[in-house]
Amino acid sequence: MSGEVILEIRDLHTHFFLRRGVLKAVDGVSFTLRRGEVLGLVGESGCGKSMTALSIMRLLPKGSARTVAGQVLLGGDDLLRKTPREMRDIRGGRISMILQDPQTSLNPVFSIGDQLREAIFRRTHAARRDVMREAVAALRHVDIAAPEQRIAQYPHQLSGGMKQRVVGAIAMSGHPEVLIADEPTTALDVTIQLQYLKLLKRLQQESNMAILFITHDFGVVARMCDRVAVMYAGRIVECGPVREVFEHPSHPYTQALIASVPQLSGTTGRLATIDGQPPSMLDLPRGCRFAPRCKYAMPHCRDTYPDSFDVGVAHTADCWRLAPA
Amino acid sequence: MTGEPLLRVEHLRKYYPFTQGVLLAMTLGEVKAVDDISFAIAAGRTLGLVGESGCGKTTTSKMILNLEQPTSGQVLLDGRPIHGLHGKALREYRALVQAVFQDPWSSLNPRMTAGRIIAESLVVAGWDRVRIAERVSELLEHVGLRAEQAAQYPHEFSGGQRQRIALAGALASRPRLIVLDEPVSALDVSIRAQMMNLLKDVQAQDNVAYLLVAHDLATVRYMADDTVVMYLGKIVEHAPTRSLFDNVRHPYTKALLSAVLPPRVDQADDEIVLTGEIPSPLNPPHGCRFHTRCPFVMRRCSEEEPVLREVMRGHLVACHLEV
């Protein structure tokens, strides 16, 4: 993994300003993504992983949400300083996104061809016939059989897996440098999920694009990613190469999360559990956010958020227990 | 495990007519949602029912809950057929067979307190208020909540706590069987393990049987004593869970196992990735219904439907490879 850094997130803070208080959905997130690399962003619901993605795309829900600090550097350009018009060209061009549910990301009243051709035309302004040819090729590229016939069909005529492949074709039609995939297989059947992951991996390797892959499933991370960042209550608590993190998880949260996943081998006794629940994002603990659930918590953990410590090659974790003596 | 099992499903079929037109509707065909399946659940045991969308697992559980009438075949509880029950007998059946559904955000009435939700079946059964209050407190503690939380509304609970409330409600009438329809798949990873442990504890204490409907084989492996794998309305493999995982026989089960991605970096070499889509149950393939996606397909598979037969002790497989 020695490609140049294509996307760098520095100390990103995205808050929701609600009547009940300030909800710190993303509270100091930093990471880098290199060309041709797949970075998994793992965490449970409400940990801020989707809000991180939407902050990068500048697609935060209108109204209460605002990115209050940080930088999103795409090839050195800060996306947070772009005008809305400039952002419109960057989205679907240099950076693109696939969402969880293909049912809602496709418009039901337009054929898939219309939606694909719109994406291609907006970028190329090419002649009708050329756009059509490119659209058919894009569908063939994502393994849609008989694309010439399929292109005239509407979303309801396609299965879930096929719809998600069409969404992928649209997202990749602009040959993006960075693709953000937010739980792209969660809504699919298990055997279809595996097909889709294989397809995405193949396309990524062919085009050398970088993917930020958001998921809650460590199995998907194992299959897809080079590196993984584990997020808890608005912060990345551990980040490193996938094999490193799986074999030597260093943050107590990562350790507990990996231990609580049922396995296909070994005993079927009691599963390890994490007691309690994630903290309210409106009222975060002062120190380490995992301290109230952590079996190793020390008084110091409750007072001060831990620094990031190196625990291996390119592998860091935010935990006071890892501080060099 | 001798004598009469708690629940028996015999040659159960459910066909839905497929019509065109409104006034003079023409029947064009039938969707064979469930097509001749049989299995049994013993008291205090767990049967896992696994498959993808359209395989008929939801239709099967609806028939067991007596919410759908079968086209043919029957479901027996303690040897007595359940369809055709009326009045008091039907109410008694509903008390004995309960359900917990996937999504605790939509399965609990937002305008009722947790206590009222849990008490629902006791109110129907005509219990008096004092006894109901006692039983509700007992149930809340049984599922790991506090008795005073009975006064709170569903929105005040997290997803995992809501699923505990749903379980307490199902347990209220002292059922002998609970249909668990994807009980953990809507929960967060760190909460799933808590719920699965709780379900096992409750089973050990109350001797209640579970029909666990799930798509995740790892969950089933932890929970179920026996496992049934369905594909397009048919059972393709049925075995004691341990035997199923040690000795997977049907190519579809193998593919499902490959699709459960282990949180490990090393990949198995014998992985099977299926190509193609799940065929429509409106027009299932001839012969073996899986033959259009099977990597080991032979000529015979498209011509002749394989029968479910025992290949090892208690291990049934429907596949022409088993000769």
Image (spheres, coloured by chain):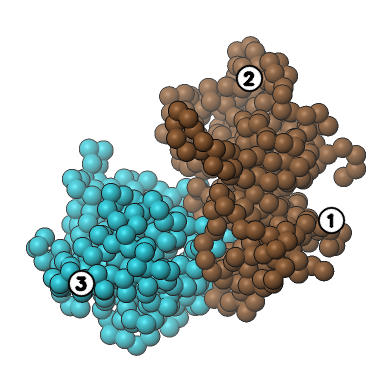
Q: Nearer the viewer, residue B186 or B231?
A: B231
Q: Residue B195: horizontal and vertical position, in percent?
A: 59, 46
The residue that mark 3 highlights is A129
Residue farthest to the right, as pictured: B2
Q: Give the secondary structure at mark 1.
A: loop
The residue that mark 1 highlights is B314
Mark seen at residue A13: none
Q: Residue A201: horizontal and vertical position, in percent?
A: 43, 75
At 27% from the left edge and 81% from the top edge, which residue is drawn?
A5
Q: Is residue B172 visible?
A: yes
The amino acid type found where label 3 is placed reads Arg
At 82% from the left edge and 69% from the top edge, which residue is drawn?
B323
Q: Is residue A63 left or right of residue A25?
A: left
Quarter of the image with the N terminus of chain B is: top right
> Subunit of mark 2?
B
Q: Quadrant of residue A11?
A: bottom left
Q: Is residue B207 visible?
A: no
Q: Is residue B262 left or right of residue A80?
A: right
Q: Residue A134: horizontal and vertical position, in percent?
A: 26, 74
Are the numbered discs 1 and 3 placed on the same chain, yes or no? Answer: no
Q: Quadrant of residue A162?
A: bottom left
Q: CA distance from mark 2 to mark 3?
A: 68 Å
The hue of chain B in the figure is brown
Between tags 1 and 3, which lies in front? Answer: 3
Q: Is residue A203 left or right of residue B317?
A: left
